[in-house]
Amino acid sequence: MTDGEQQEALVKRAEDEREDIFRRYELGLDPSNVVDSWENPSFEVYMKTDRYGFLHDERLPTTRDAQETHRNNVEVERVRKWVKMLKQWPPPPDKLHKRIYKGVPDRVKAEVWMNLLNIHQSMEKNPGVYARMLQLARKYSTETRQIDADVNRQFRDNIAFRERYSVKQCSLFNVLNAYSIYNSELGYCQGMACVAGVLLLYLHEEETFWALNSLITDQKYGMHGLFIEGFPKLTRFIDHHDRIMSKIMRKLHKHFTKHNVDALLYAIKWFFVVFVERVPFSLSLRVWDIFMLDGDRVILSMAITILYLHKDDLLRLKDMDAIIEYLQVRLHKNFGYSDDDAIQALERVMKKLKDLKLDVPPPAKSNEFPSRKLGDFVEADMEKKIGRRRNDYTDAEKQVITDVISRQEQNAIEVQSTVSYETSECATVTLTVPEDSHSIRSSLAGTSVASHGSSETMSLEDNNIHLRTANMLQNTPQREMLLGT
């Protein structure tokens, strides 16, 4: 067999596999669509389904307690106010801000999200586009196999996604495949399945497609830069997260550095999917509401809020594994604060970061946004068509590896830095930095090295955050500690 014939055979095999996967999703729950037993976990061990459809190994309470009754009464009243406000959209900004930070009731969340993301307008401007992208995906998508695998893993503890080839699983599969064609420069990245999955809990299939597009391409949210090869926005946000930590949470920052806890180890899912599966789902939804209103600066502020609220526990943990397990697992099961308390703390953190001019990271570079026209079909190259894995790294991937090494070197420097600590987070910190110090990674991160620095006094007391900046030093380079990806 010649090389050309071999390639044709491989392309044909990939096409047949893609068609078979699409056919199974098309059949859905039809009895003829036989699935392996492991793909449909039993419901019997679960006794409780929460309001969002997630299953828990608990018995349902026999009666409602006074707190639950009060919460239900409050939500009924909020629904009434939201219904009235939605009829007069858009409302005054201050009123909308106040309502969203108090929480968007489930019964109106779909309409609120559609308004915040301008989904109605997107659908009106692009009639038939989603259906056309889905048709092209069935014929040409090179991401189908990976999407199929991820759909089968997404939210399997939620009743909407638990059954193989359920309506929501099929919708998730369709949305991700269609979007891989619509935004051909991005294609598909695994974090997108979780983002689309959350949207599908409240929106219909085509609505989810356009909501996902808004979150990815709108500069207010800019998730394209998180998912594109090289993850430039992740790099930029982790850099800024570390910059904030080094200024207002120095003790915890040094503790993390001492135990080799790079922000990359705990913040990827925070930033990629806006805290889903890292904090209780009810709290992550509250953050999503605020994220859709105020944009991506919310993600940085929420990350700092989580670390501040739990800093005492984190400082007591003495190794990397324990710290990561606490941030990735324990907080999801038991956050330790009510949703209302956490959001109030978030709002205060956002205000104080704004006062310190730390709420917004350095501006994005052009590689964080699509450069190709959305919706234009671009046929994949032969390597992608046949599903052959690359043996070498791209330039972006090589840069990521370089960044990780640089970060490790910077960590070693950080541990040996001349830093004076008191016993609390209110410590006065003195940093000695050479005049020519600069970040090896500033180019990739899209940041610039400022020509000033500061010695600051910060205090964080209970849930009321007081940040005091003193003794601004002139003519000293700003010290940037940039984290790797």
Image (cartoon, rainbow, N blue to C red):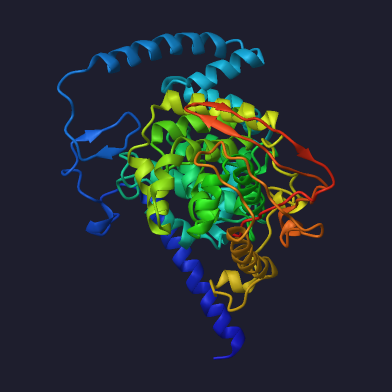
Find residue 22 and report its horizontal and vertical position in percent.
Answer: 44, 56
404 vs 172: above or below: below
308 vs 448: above or below: above
Q: Residue at x 76, y 49 (%)?
A: 478
Q: Residue at x 65, y 47 (%)?
A: 243
Judging depth in this view, the residue of 376 and 268 nearest the camera is 268
Image quarter in which the N terminus is found: bottom right
Judging depth in this view, the residue of 403 and 103 nearest the camera is 403
330 on left or right of 462: left
Judging depth in this view, the residue of 253 and 212 nearest the camera is 253
Q: Name the image quarter holding residue 118.
A: top right
Residue 431 visible, this angle:
yes
Q: Residue furthest toward the bottom?
A: 1
Find residue 311 and report its horizontal and vertical position in percent.
Answer: 46, 41
107 vs 134: above or below: above
Q: How many marks?
A: 0
Find residue 404 and report its horizontal and vertical position in percent.
Answer: 60, 65
Find residue 67 and report its horizontal and vertical position in percent.
Answer: 29, 16
Judging depth in this view, the residue of 187 and 48 nearest the camera is 48
Q: Name the image quarter holding residue 445.
A: bottom right
471 on left or right of 208: right
Residue 90 visible, this angle:
no
